Image (tube, helix red, strand yellow):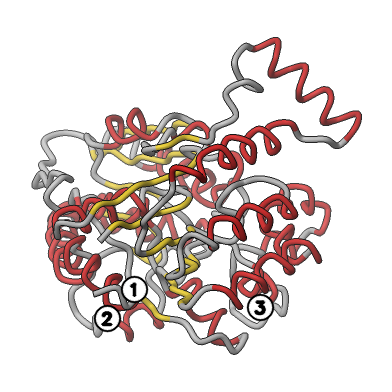
Amino acid sequence: MKILLLGEYSRLHNSLKEGLVSLDHEVIIIGCGDKFKQFPVDYSIYAKTCNKTKLGNIIFKGIRKITSIDFEKIEKAIRFYFLIPKLTKFDHVQLINSDALETYTFLSRFLYKRLFAKIKSRSLLVCGDETPVIEYLLKNEMKYSILTPYFANKSHKKQFHFPLKYITSEYRKTFNWLNENCQNIITSDLDYQIPMQKMGFKTTFIPNPINTDKIEYSPLKIDDKIIIFLGINRLSYLKKGIPYFEKALEIIQTKYTEKVEVIITENIPYNEYISIYNKTHILLDQIYAYDQGYNALEAMTKGKVVFTGAETEFLQHYHLSENEVCVNALPDENDIVEKLSLLIENPDLILEISKNAKAFIEKEHHYKTIASTYLKTWGVI
């Protein structure tokens, strides 16, 4: 089979590609690489011209500020337009989300129509912000969500531009068009499956694929200090609840000066990010989650103890009652401090959770098993 994966934000499509290729399928990824993260793609539509030089970047940003015309979005659309003639004889195309091309919505629809004229089997993946997801979260019916900081302080609206854009009429129009023209809507974790179901959409839940052959597991060793890592992405600073982690770490550093080492990074490329957290024991991922996102799952594969989403819904879905595979991070710095303190004072617990995490990933997220599930859902085998 020949499969096109459109867009890449977390390495999900790369891992899915690896699983599909291992099953003897041909796979092409088209995307931008997600800004500073620089995920690999086969054909890039990154706005090279607009970002070629520092001066050029400043000029284009200045034009955007004055005129509201975003030449980066236009360049991405142009680059994809000229790729379309090469996209022939594909058996299936999957979009990472409705904004997979990261361009203006009217251009997205125009380009999707041209692409879909060539590829008849299509699916839409919901693995992040999406129109029905944000519409449901705005009802504020869950005990918390990525919009909790927005509800607490509406002055943060500008910082929630990315999720809130999906409820504008143009983005809603794009999602509705894709909903009508894709045979499948697939969700990657419970943070998206729950809202999609609440909004009445028929979806297929397929856990994130993790390449357990490529990601090396190293049994944790605690010889001296316990190393705690926090990687900050400023674009998702509030929606991931990073301030709670920062406050907790201030307390922990004072409380356990001789027992811990804290590493904090900000907006670094994916490969650099990975190389830094390889030596850590505990990774602080996100607060407002019910399930684990891709970053947490990769860290768990390496045997890290991850503070992330592990709510009741997650435990029930995977039938987990005894073996802790990660730590449920709540929007309460004192709760985070308490859970970190328990681990610091009981290093054997860190080693136990590390082993549980690796076993869980092997069982529920193995990339070849997940790739097979995608193929069955797409109906191309």
Task: Tell me the distance, in whole angstroms, between the alpha carbons under discs 1 and 2.
Answer: 13 Å
- What residue do we see at 21% from left, 60% from top? 367
- Please report the residue visible at 39 percent of the width from the left and 82 percent of the height from the top: 312
In-image side of 206 versus 114 (left or right):
left
Q: Secondary structure at mark 1?
A: loop
- Residue sitting at x 27%, y 30%: 275
- The kind of residue on which mark 1 rests is Ile
Query: Quick check: 135 left or right of 52?
Result: right
Looking at the image, tell me whether mark 1 or mark 2 is earlier in sequence order.
Answer: 1
Q: How many other residues sit within 10 Å of disc 3, few (<14), some (14-19) or many (≥20)?
A: some
Q: Residue at x 15, y 65 (%)?
A: 356
- Quadrant where the image shows the C terminus: bottom left
* Residue located beneath label 1 in the image: 206
- Closest to the camera, between mark 2 and mark 3, is 3
In the image, residue 369 above or below residue 72: below
- Residue closer to the observer: 244 or 113: 113
Q: Viewer-nearest of labels 3 and 1?
A: 1
Q: Earlier in the sequence, mark 3 or mark 1?
A: 3
Report the side of 366 relative to 339 (left or right). left
Q: CA distance from mark 2 to mark 3?
A: 24 Å
Q: Amino acid at mark 2?
A: Tyr
> Please, what secondary structure does the residue beneath circle 2 have?
loop
Q: How many marks?
A: 3
| Residue 5 locus on image (x, y percent) | 40, 54
Amino acid at the residue labelled 3: Tyr
The quadrant where residue 205 appears:
bottom left
Q: Count neighbours of disc 1 (C-alpha within 10 A) and say few if under 14, some if 14 to 19, many if 20 or more.
A: many
- Rendered location of residue 110, percent (x, y): 68, 55
Name the residue beneath numbered marker 3.
Answer: 136
Q: Nearer the viewer, residue 348 or 183?
A: 183
